[in-house]
Amino acid sequence: MALLFHSKIKRNDWWQEEIAKHIPDLEVRFYPDVGNPEDIEFALCFAMPHGVLAGLPNLKGIFSLGAGVDHFFNDPDFPRHVPMARVVDPELTDRMSEYVVQHVLNHHRYQHQYDQQQKEHVWKERHAPAARDRKIGILGLGALGTGAAEMLRNLNFDVAGWSRSAKNIDGITCFHGADQLDRFLARTEILICLLPLTEETTGILNKELFAKLPEGAALINPGRGPHLVEEDLIDALNSDHLSAATLDVFHQEPLPEDNPLWDHPKIRITPHVASIAAPDRVAALAAQNILRARAGEPLINQVDPDKGY
Ligand code: NAP
């Protein structure tokens, strides 16, 4: 039996060797060299071309190469009955927390405005409040949102988070559900989106949401591109309702050269690098799950297809 691998980044020999360290008898095949589809027992992939997974009759487990699984559900033929898992890993969480802290500090200390002032040779001091008086809000209190919230709390920021179900996290003000979203937004000066991309969260960063943030609020989006309605962000920045934004993810990646986000003076762009799962950690997690699936045990970090994350 075999594992089918697909990624945008081609390091085929490396993956074969890494999986073999954990499960020496498992053959790794690299899409599009599927061979006999009946041989494929597992898939380890990101953005597999649509329809491929549905054509594998003996699949026992599908593993995402990253934390997000929206790429699975984009495939209209995705076999939802096959157990699937995603990456949850302390190192991935730490890398995301670093990204969030880096950009929160930039917004908190007005670095965007200073960058612009430097271009114009303007000397104008701005005084940031103490961290304890800066209100940060994180949409999504899962593995990544909670990690970022805790790192910011440890820097003394006044941190709140919003999730679907109720949470109790030491030192974090927790909101949940649609009913509490407005209260969460009303107190948020720097908003970070760490939601998964689902039907419910697509387009959540839109003009109605921006209008509920206090004037001068900033946005950081390392979630997914389609969380954001790009034109609504540009309008909110142009009207000075929002002060600045940092974007890591986009509807289309790479971001097309002619996209207006590139040149907006209040937008800082990073090329989907907030947190990349380390391949050796991904291979070890996949191997653990392969052994569990073969033993008939539930997967670690199993995804609920009904929730979509
Ligand atoms: P996760 O553990 O599944 O957490 C998701 C959080 O979002 C949970 O707290 C969940 O609430 C909340 N949520 C989901 N739907 C909601 C809704 N409709 N209303 C309110 N809250 C909702 O996911 P994660 O591991 O933290 O990852 C989050 C996302 O980060 C990934 O899906 C991916 O898109 C993105 N990501 C980006 C990068 C990058 O480099 N830019 C890297 C990795 C991941 P409950 O806790 O109540 O379920």
Image (cartoon, grey):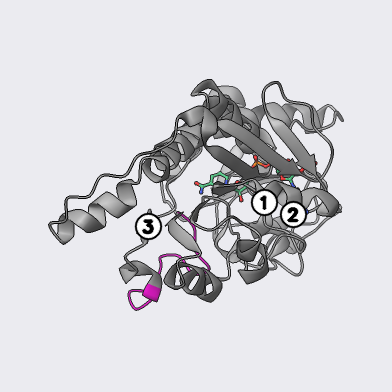
Residue at image position (47%, 41%) is 276
Work out how far the residue at label 2 is from the one at label 1, CA to CA, in angstroms: 6 Å
Foreground mark, 3 or 2, reads 2
Instruction: Sort mark 2 into few (<14), some (14-19) or many (20+) by Cα contacts within 10 Å.
Output: some
Labelled pair 3, 2 in contact (Cβ < 8 Å): no
SS under mark 1: helix
| Coordinates of residue 209 in the picture (x, y in percent) | 66, 63
Q: Which residue is mark 3?
A: 269
What segment carries the magenta color?
Answer: 248-260
Asked if disc 1 is less than 8 Å from ligand 1, the answer is no
Q: How many angstroms separate mark 1 from mark 3 (CA)?
A: 26 Å
Q: Amino acid at mark 2?
A: Asp
Check if mark 2's residue and mark 1's residue have beta carbons within 8 Å: yes
Tell which of 86 and 297 is nearer to you. Answer: 86
Of labels 1 and 3, earlier in sequence is 1
Residue pictured at 74% horizontal, 63% vertical? 55
Dot 3 or dot 2: first in sequence order is 2
The disc at residue 105 is none
Question: Badge 1 is on which residue?
Answer: 186
Q: Quadrant of residue 105?
A: top left
Residue ID at (83%, 26%): 295
Q: Nearer the viewer, residue 272 or 13?
A: 272
Q: Secondary structure at mark 3?
A: strand
Q: Position of residue 198 (x, y in %)?
A: 73, 59
Tell me the quadrant of the picture where the N terminus can be found: top right
What kind of residue is marked 3? Ile
